[in-house]
Image (spheres, grey):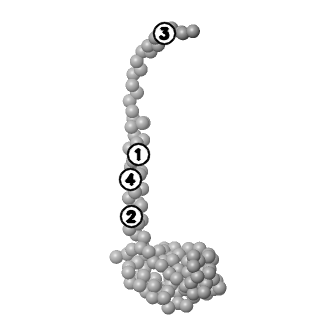
Protein backbone atom coordinates (compact mmCIF):
# COMPACT_ATOMS: atom_id res chain seq x y z
CA UNK A 1 0.00 0.00 0.00
CA UNK A 2 1.46 3.33 -1.06
CA UNK A 3 1.40 6.08 1.50
CA UNK A 4 2.80 9.58 1.54
CA UNK A 5 5.56 10.53 3.98
CA UNK A 6 7.54 13.66 4.75
CA UNK A 7 11.15 13.02 5.68
CA UNK A 8 12.94 15.99 7.23
CA UNK A 9 16.63 15.64 7.89
CA UNK A 10 19.35 18.02 9.04
CA UNK A 11 22.94 17.80 7.85
CA UNK A 12 26.10 19.47 9.10
CA UNK A 13 26.32 23.19 8.30
CA UNK A 14 29.83 22.85 6.86
CA UNK A 15 28.79 20.27 4.25
CA UNK A 16 29.67 21.24 0.66
CA UNK A 17 26.87 21.68 -1.89
CA UNK A 18 28.31 18.93 -4.12
CA UNK A 19 28.28 16.47 -1.21
CA UNK A 20 24.74 17.48 -0.31
CA UNK A 21 23.61 16.92 -3.92
CA UNK A 22 25.29 13.53 -3.89
CA UNK A 23 23.56 12.56 -0.62
CA UNK A 24 20.12 13.62 -1.91
CA UNK A 25 20.59 11.76 -5.21
CA UNK A 26 21.68 8.65 -3.29
CA UNK A 27 18.55 8.81 -1.15
CA UNK A 28 16.35 9.35 -4.23
CA UNK A 29 17.90 6.35 -5.99
CA UNK A 30 17.37 4.16 -2.91
CA UNK A 31 13.70 5.20 -2.86
CA UNK A 32 13.19 4.32 -6.51
CA UNK A 33 15.09 1.04 -6.09
CA UNK A 34 12.76 0.09 -3.22
CA UNK A 35 9.68 0.78 -5.36
CA UNK A 36 8.74 4.26 -4.14
CA UNK A 37 8.70 7.70 -5.71
CA UNK A 38 10.12 11.02 -4.57
CA UNK A 39 7.40 13.65 -5.01
CA UNK A 40 9.51 16.67 -4.06
CA UNK A 41 12.80 17.78 -2.55
CA UNK A 42 12.78 21.06 -0.65
CA UNK A 43 16.07 22.56 0.45
CA UNK A 44 15.20 24.86 3.30
CA UNK A 45 18.72 26.18 3.77
CA UNK A 46 20.88 26.75 6.81
CA UNK A 47 18.99 27.45 10.04
CA UNK A 48 19.76 27.73 13.69
CA UNK A 49 18.94 24.66 15.79
CA UNK A 50 16.80 24.91 18.91
CA UNK A 51 19.54 23.24 20.93
CA UNK A 52 23.07 22.00 20.36
CA UNK A 53 23.23 18.67 18.52
CA UNK A 54 26.60 16.91 18.14
CA UNK A 55 28.44 20.19 18.82
CA UNK A 56 26.50 22.02 16.08
CA UNK A 57 24.29 25.06 16.61
CA UNK A 58 23.22 25.27 12.94
CA UNK A 59 22.25 22.80 10.27
CA UNK A 60 21.08 22.54 6.67
CA UNK A 61 17.44 21.41 6.50
CA UNK A 62 16.14 19.19 3.68
CA UNK A 63 12.53 18.03 3.29
CA UNK A 64 11.76 14.99 1.12
CA UNK A 65 8.19 14.05 0.24
CA UNK A 66 8.14 10.34 -0.53
CA UNK A 67 5.38 8.02 -1.71
CA UNK A 68 5.76 4.31 -1.06
CA UNK A 69 5.38 1.52 1.43
CA UNK A 70 6.85 1.03 4.87
CA UNK A 71 9.89 -0.84 3.55
CA UNK A 72 10.91 2.27 1.57
CA UNK A 73 10.88 4.40 4.71
CA UNK A 74 12.65 1.72 6.71
CA UNK A 75 15.48 1.66 4.16
CA UNK A 76 15.72 5.47 4.07
CA UNK A 77 15.91 5.72 7.85
CA UNK A 78 18.57 3.00 7.95
CA UNK A 79 20.67 4.93 5.44
CA UNK A 80 20.24 8.21 7.32
CA UNK A 81 21.23 6.54 10.60
CA UNK A 82 24.59 5.38 9.20
CA UNK A 83 25.35 8.54 7.18
CA UNK A 84 27.83 10.61 9.19
CA UNK A 85 26.90 14.15 8.01
CA UNK A 86 23.23 13.68 9.01
CA UNK A 87 22.63 15.21 12.43
CA UNK A 88 18.92 14.45 12.90
CA UNK A 89 15.97 13.12 10.90
CA UNK A 90 12.24 12.68 11.35
CA UNK A 91 9.67 10.86 9.23
CA UNK A 92 5.95 11.69 9.35
CA UNK A 93 3.11 9.99 7.49
CA UNK A 94 0.94 12.70 5.92
CA UNK A 95 -1.57 10.83 3.73
CA UNK A 96 -4.24 10.64 6.46
CA UNK A 97 -3.81 14.34 7.17
CA UNK A 98 -4.20 15.18 3.48
CA UNK A 99 -7.43 13.13 3.32
CA UNK A 100 -8.76 14.92 6.39
CA UNK A 101 -7.93 18.35 4.95
CA UNK A 102 -9.59 17.49 1.62
CA UNK A 103 -12.72 16.37 3.46
CA UNK A 104 -12.85 19.63 5.44
CA UNK A 105 -12.37 21.63 2.23
CA UNK A 106 -15.28 19.80 0.56
CA UNK A 107 -17.51 20.50 3.56
CA UNK A 108 -16.61 24.19 3.49
CA UNK A 109 -17.29 24.42 -0.23
CA UNK A 110 -20.65 22.67 0.23
CA UNK A 111 -21.60 25.09 2.99
CA UNK A 112 -20.64 28.07 0.83
CA UNK A 113 -22.84 26.77 -1.99
CA UNK A 114 -25.79 26.16 0.35
CA UNK A 115 -25.52 29.58 1.98
CA UNK A 116 -25.23 31.30 -1.41
CA UNK A 117 -28.31 29.59 -2.92
CA UNK A 118 -31.05 31.00 -0.62
CA UNK A 119 -29.83 34.57 -1.08
CA UNK A 120 -29.83 34.27 -4.85
CA UNK A 121 -33.04 32.24 -5.16
CA UNK A 122 -35.10 34.10 -2.54
CA UNK A 123 -38.45 35.20 -4.05
CA UNK A 124 -39.08 38.91 -4.15
CA UNK A 125 -41.88 39.71 -1.68
CA UNK A 126 -44.60 42.04 -2.83
CA UNK A 127 -44.23 45.37 -1.15
CA UNK A 128 -47.10 46.44 1.10
CA UNK A 129 -48.54 49.89 0.52
CA UNK A 130 -46.69 52.52 2.51
CA UNK A 131 -48.57 53.73 5.55
CA UNK A 132 -47.83 57.28 6.61
CA UNK A 133 -46.43 57.48 10.14
CA UNK A 134 -48.76 58.80 12.81
CA UNK A 135 -48.12 62.39 13.68
CA UNK A 136 -47.01 63.03 17.22
CA UNK A 137 -47.62 66.36 18.90
CA UNK A 138 -44.46 68.35 19.37
CA UNK A 139 -43.68 69.25 22.92
CA UNK A 140 -42.12 72.57 23.66
Marks 3/1: CA–CA distance: 46 Å
Q: Mark 4 points at which residue?
A: 107
Marks 1/4: CA–CA distance: 10 Å
Q: Which residue is at the front of the view, 51 or 13?
A: 51
Which label was assigned to residue 113?
Answer: 1
3 and 4 marks in contact (CB < 8 Å)? no
Q: In which quarter of the image is residue 101?
A: bottom left
1 and 2 marks in contact (CB < 8 Å)? no
Q: Residues within 10 Å of mark 2 (few under 14, many from 20)?
A: few
Q: Name the residue under label 2.
A: 99
Q: Mark 3 points at which residue?
A: 135
Q: Which residue is at the front of the view, 52 or 16?
A: 52
1 and 4 marks in contact (CB < 8 Å)? no
* Any part of residue 86 in sight: yes
* Placement of the C terminus among the 4 image quadrants: top right
**Residue 1 in the image, given as x and y percentages of width and height:** 34, 76
Residue most extreme to the front? 140
Amino acid sequence: MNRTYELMFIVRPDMADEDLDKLISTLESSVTAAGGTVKSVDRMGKRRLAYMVRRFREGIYILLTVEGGGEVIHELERRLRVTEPVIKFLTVRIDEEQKRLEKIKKLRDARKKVSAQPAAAAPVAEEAPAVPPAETPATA
